[in-house]
């Protein structure tokens, strides 16, 4: 790998509120230490949106991971927006490159990479995603790119889900037209043009799409429900059935209502820990590319190192 000297020391953060439960610092610092990189990753817990904006404007960082509630704000502050961030309507990664601030969203790719690692083949599958925020849209998009037959975006109000889904599809269409003929970014995945043409993009509410929820092969809850004790599941858990794969992006807050229901009826269930590690690996590879860091470590090797640091013995 490329060895950097002390002049290449960089500061990185996780920005959001709350972030005290985040495993990101311990995971990233373990990787940077293993690779002997002079990079330091810390918490930036800011509850006030004005203060968060001031922190972003100062640009006193190499990169930051962004979590709730600042993903849309971070996207606005970027000079260049990657397609993943544009389609999600928010970014979870800002990185400095020269004088420019680049925005990415690695939530979707990290989530799908983790689920594929767990044995999920998305080709021909029906995938339901709960929530209408940037994380939900990123997963909605990544599942379609991974080969899903149909993806369903769910919200509390059908009008909101409709508007968000249609806005996403309009952007995807423009990107598909501009990128026609370009190959897929990953083996066994679709190109953007093929994704637009081959996947059925649907929307609904938790009360109007009960049959679709019950029929889905994969369900991902990307809402904040479960971060507080007593939070309900986003939809009626009676709709779950044995054989479904259910994932809750929440982690570190105890067993959620959705987790209990999914396990009780025989679903395969995963919490958000694996997704966190997956998007962290994608993030690290982006930053290495921007900084000119060369490493022979594979995705799986980086995943294993970061998973052991953040969730020892839990993720295999």
Image (tube, grey):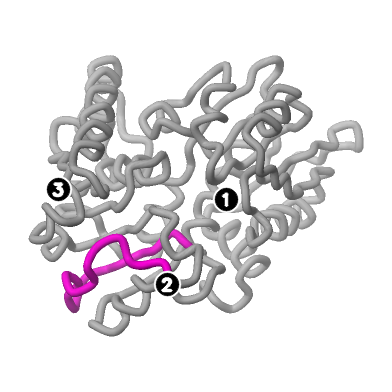
The span from disc 2 to disc 1 (Cα, nearest Å) is 23 Å
Q: Name the residue under label 1.
A: 280
- Ranked by sequence position, the earlier of labels 2 and 1 is 2
Q: Quadrant of the N terminus?
A: top right
Q: Name the residue under label 2.
A: 256
In this view, 126 is above or below 6: below
In this view, 165 is above or below 111: above
Circles 2 and 1, Cβ within 8 Å, touching? The answer is no
Residue 85 is left or right of residue 309, and the answer is left
Look at 27% across and 33% down and name the residue there. Answer: 164
Mark 1 crowd level (few <14, some 14–19, many ≥20, 10 Å Cα):
many
Nearer to us: label 3 or label 2 = 2
Q: Residue furthest right?
A: 6
**To which quarter of the image does residue 20 belong?**
bottom right
Range of residues picked out in magenta: 231-250
Mark 3 crowd level (few <14, some 14–19, many ≥20, 10 Å Cα):
some
């Amino acid at each position: 790998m490329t060895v950097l000297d002390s002049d290449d020391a960089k500061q990185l953060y996780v920005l959001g509120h709350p972030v005290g439960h985040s495993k990101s610092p311990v995971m990233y610092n373990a990787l940077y230490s293993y690779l002997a990189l002079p990079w330091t990753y810390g918490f930036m817990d800011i509850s006030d949106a004005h203060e968060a904006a001031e922190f972003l404007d100062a640009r006193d960082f190499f990169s930051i991971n962004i979590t709730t509630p600042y993903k849309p704000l971070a996207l606005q502050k970027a000079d260049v927006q990657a397609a993943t961030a544009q389609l999600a309507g928010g970014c979870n990664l800002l990185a400095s490159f020269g004088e420019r601030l680049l925005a990415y969203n690695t939530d979707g790719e990290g989530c799908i990479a983790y689920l594929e690692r767990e044995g999920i083949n998305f080709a021909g599958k029906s995938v339901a995603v709960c929530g209408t925020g940037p994380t939900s849209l990123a997963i909605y998009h990544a599942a379609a790119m991974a080969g899903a037959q149909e993806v369903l975006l769910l919200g509390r109000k059908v009008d909101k889900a409709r508007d968000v889904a249609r806005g996403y599809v309009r952007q995807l269409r423009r990107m598909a037209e501009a990128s026609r003929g370009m190959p897929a970014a990953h083996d066994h995945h679709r190109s953007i043009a093929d994704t637009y043409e081959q996947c059925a993009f649907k929307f609904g509410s938790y009360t109007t799409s009960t049959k679709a929820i019950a029929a889905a092969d994969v369900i991902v809850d990307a809402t904040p429900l479960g971060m507080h004790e007593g939070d309900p599941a986003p939809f009626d858990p009676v709709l779950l059935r044995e054989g479904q794969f259910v994932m809750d992006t929440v982690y570190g807050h105890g067993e959620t209502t959705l987790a209990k229901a999914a396990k009780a009826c025989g679903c395969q269930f995963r919490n958000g820990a694996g997704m966190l590690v997956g998007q962290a690996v994608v993030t690290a590879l982006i930053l290495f590319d921007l900084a000119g860091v060369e490493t022979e470590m594979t995705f799986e090797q980086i995943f294993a190192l970061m998973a052991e640091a953040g969730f020892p013995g839990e993720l295999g």
